[in-house]
Amino acid sequence: LNYLVLEPGEALFLNANEPHAYLFGDCIECMAESDNVVRAGLTPKFKDVDVLCEMLTYDDGPPYMVPPLLIDGGAERYIAPVPEFLVDRAMVEAGGAVLLPASPFVSIVVVVEGRGKLEELVRQQPQLGGGANSVDGLVHAVRQGSVFMACAGTALQVRAEERLLIFRATAKHDLAEAEAAGGGGAPSLPTTTAASASASASASA
C-alpha cells in the first residue's frame, strides 16, 4: 500500500477493487453506487478472503491525485476519471460568498465547518421573447454538520457568517452543457460495467 498524507484541499481517486484505509484525520469520500463491499481487515465485520484475493487488481503505482479546478463562482471542482460523480469544495471566509453553479442532477451538500446561509437559486425556463432568469428560493441557516439535498437545476449561493467549509457531490456533467440546458433536462450519463467494488474519491477537509 502507498502511505499518503493529504493536506487540506488535496484529493485522490481510488478505482474499483483497490483496498484503502484511513488512519486519522477528516476527509470527504464520494463513492459510486455499489452493492458490494469486501473488507480486508481491521474490522469485526465479515472478511471474505477468497473473494478479496480474486478481485484485487494488484496494480503497483503511485496514488492518482485529483487536482482541484477553479470554477465560476469561486468554488473548486474535483473531477474524477469516472462518469458517476464529481465533488465541489468551497472555503468561504467570514463575510464572503461563493456560488455553486447549478447541476442538472440532484446534489448532496455537506457543511464541514463554520456557520452561514445557503440560498437556493432556481433558474426558470426561457419565456417567449426573453431569456432565462435566476429567481431567489429558500434560504437555509447552515452550520457544521448540516446536510442538504439540492434539486436538479438549483444553484447555491453560500454566504459565511464565520469561516465556512462546504462540499457538494453530484453526478458528473459539463458546465457548458448544464448552462445550455438552463437547469432543465439532465444530460445522459455514460454507462459503466459494474465491478466488485466501486470507485471513490477522497478530499481532505
Image: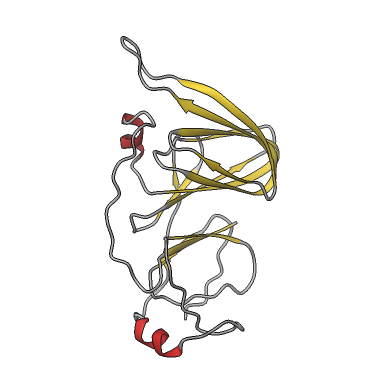
Residue placed most toward the observer, 123 or 179: 123
Q: Furthest residue to the bottom?
A: 50
Question: Is 181 on the left-hand or right-hand side of 165?
Answer: left
Q: What residue appears at the point 42 percent right and 22 percent down from the top-left corner? A: 124
- Residue 151's spot in the image, x, y percent? 48, 38
Residue placed most toward the observer, 60 or 143: 143
Q: What residue appears at the point 39 percent right and 38 percent down from the top-left corner? A: 104
Q: What residue appears at the point 52 percent right and 28 percent down from the top-left corner? A: 121
Q: How many marks?
A: 0
Say which quarter of the image contains residue 65: bottom left
- Residue 27's spot in the image, x, y percent? 58, 61
Q: Quadrant of the C terminus?
A: bottom right
- Residue 56's spot in the image, x, y percent? 37, 81
- Residue 115's spot in the image, x, y percent? 71, 41
Say which quarter of the image contains residue 97: top right
Judging from the image, the colouring scheme is: secondary structure
Residue placed most toward the observer, 37 or 203: 37
Q: Is residue 151 above or below residue 39?
A: above
Say which quarter of the image contains residue 60: bottom left
Question: Is 204 on the left-hand or right-hand side of 87?
Answer: right
